[in-house]
Image (spheres, grey):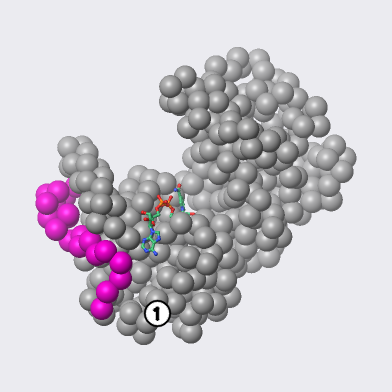
């Protein structure tokens, strides 16, 4: 039974994971490399708890919840009682491997060692420790307090018991877990998203349409909360470039988007730099103005068909169930419906025909239908 949770890394994700764990009643140890970082993280947790309290979304007082989070600089011997650790340090394989090997020394033998990595293979992190069966991926979305979805990723040696306990733990945080049964690059949600982004980029680079037409179709015909390039600007052009490159290096075959690379090199990083595909005065997000008639310029299937094919590939290969993939895109990407709902609406035949068109346009076999 899990009572004591260790969160390592008190940055963007770590402080939020610590907060949701404390809200759920766990004793939380939050570790980072300096007192200043930890103090800053606690201030952010306090601010967020106060907001939840004001809205009536916190059953206890802010002080009671905060009282369950203990900060620790570095790692220490007081971690003997930890049942699960969740690592949220920077996305660097060597750093994570070093940390896992240290955690294995300090934590009890049966502790679960989870990682919040978004793009590194769980199996490669796990290979730094002896008890690889206790290592698992728990991919929270940003911000963890508001986003319901958590992808649970099985590494090649993760045991059934570790999966079961982690699944129950994530549910106890009032989050919705989906199972990623094989350690594939991008897990479920990023695979679907990258299929869409790389295809959108390919269509623009091949001169089929303007990026604004793609964004209008995404918004007005597919009901996505944002256009594809608008989302890239929002999350960071560089972040998308690095995540897609990391996934491709590990075998995810997709169109290599030159535009993302060039913009990253130029420093056109989207909202945070004030300029990406759109411009953002004072580096603040504003919704780009897209006339609805732009959405007539391209068939929406050109955007969604590759995602449908990817989803079918994942089901066929035992990576995730249809239900979990649909939950993943609805909760992780805020799509108004699941990928398989789109497939039903458009019909398999039109999807197949579109994939053949995309293969012809791109010259890439990856667009062959699944
Ligand atoms: N930011 C996101 O939107 C997001 C979403 C999902 C997953 N992730 C993943 O979560 C992880 C953390 O990302 P982040 O955005 O929170 O990073 P971040 O840079 O905001 O925070 C990382 C923290 O780890 C600390 N740290 C570094 N080395 C440490 C060590 N050895 N021990 C303890 N603390 C250490 C740093 O001081 C920093 O406070 C990454 O693997 C990332 O890929 C990020």
Residue 323 seen in the figure: no
Residues rendered magenta in the picture: 57-77
Specify whether residue 76 is painted magenta.
yes
Quickly name the residue at label 1.
104
Can residue 267 be seen? yes
* Closer-to-camera residue (311/74): 74
Vertical side of 88 occupied by 343: above or below: above
The residue lying at 48 percent from left, 80 percent from top is 129
Could you say where residue 1 lies in the image, as x and y percent from the top left? 29, 76
- Residue placed most toward the observer, 298 or 326: 298
Tell me where residue 348 appears, x and y as whole percent.
74, 45
For the C terminus, give its image quadrant: bottom right
- 90 sits to left or right of 291: left
Place of residue 367 in the rendered image (x, y in percent of width and height, measured from the top left): 79, 47
Asked if residue 193 is positioned above or below residue 158 in the image, the reply reads: above
In which quadrant of this rendering is ligand 1 seen?
Answer: bottom left
Horizontal and vertical percent for residue 184?
A: 62, 63
**Mark 1: secondary structure:** helix
């Amino acid at each position: 039974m899990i009572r004591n949770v260790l969160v390592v890394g008190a940055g963007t994700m770590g402080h939020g994971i610590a907060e949701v764990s404390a809200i759920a009643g766990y004793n939380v140890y939050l570790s980072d490399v300096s007192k200043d970082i930890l103090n800053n993280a606690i201030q952010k947790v306090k601010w967020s708890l106060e907001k939840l309290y004001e809205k009536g979304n916190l059953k206890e007082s802010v002080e009671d919840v905060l009282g369950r989070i203990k900060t620790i600089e570095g790692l220490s011997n007081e971690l003997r009682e930890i049942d699960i650790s969740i690592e949220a340090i920077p996305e660097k394989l060597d750093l994570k491997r070093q940390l896992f090997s240290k955690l294995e020394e300090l934590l009890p033998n049966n502790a679960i060692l989870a990682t919040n990595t978004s793009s590194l293979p769980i199996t490669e992190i796990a290979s730094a420790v002896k008890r690889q069966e206790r290592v698992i991926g728990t991919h929270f979305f940003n911000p963890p307090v508001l986003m319901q979805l958590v992808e649970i990723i099985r590494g090649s040696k993760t045991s059934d018991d570790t999966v079961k306990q982690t699944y129950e733990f994530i549910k106890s945080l009032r989050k919705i877990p989906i199972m990623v049964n094989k350690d594939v690059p991008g897990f479920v949600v990023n695979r679907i998203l990258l299929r869409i982004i790389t295809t959108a980029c390919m269509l623009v680079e091949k001169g089929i349409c303007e990026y604004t037409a793609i964004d209008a179709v995404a918004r007005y015909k597919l009901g996505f909360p944002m256009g594809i390039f608008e989302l890239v600007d929002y999350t960071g052009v560089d972040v998308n470039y690095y995540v897609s490159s990391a996934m491709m290096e590990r075998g995810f075959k997709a169109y290599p988007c030159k535009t993302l690379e060039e913009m990253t090199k130029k420093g056109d990083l989207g909202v945070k730099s004030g300029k990406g595909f759109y411009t953002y005065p004072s580096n603040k997000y504003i919704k780009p103005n897209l006339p609805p008639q732009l959405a007539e310029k391209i068939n929406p299937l050109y955007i969604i068909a590759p995602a449908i094919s990817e989803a079918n590939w994942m089901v066929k290969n035992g990576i995730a169930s249809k239900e979990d993939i649909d939950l993943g895109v609805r909760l992780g990407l805020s799509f108004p419906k699941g990928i398989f709902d789109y497939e039903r609406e458009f019909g398999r035949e039109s999807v197949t025909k579109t994939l053949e068109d995309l293969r012809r346009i791109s010259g890439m076999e990856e667009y062959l239908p699944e």
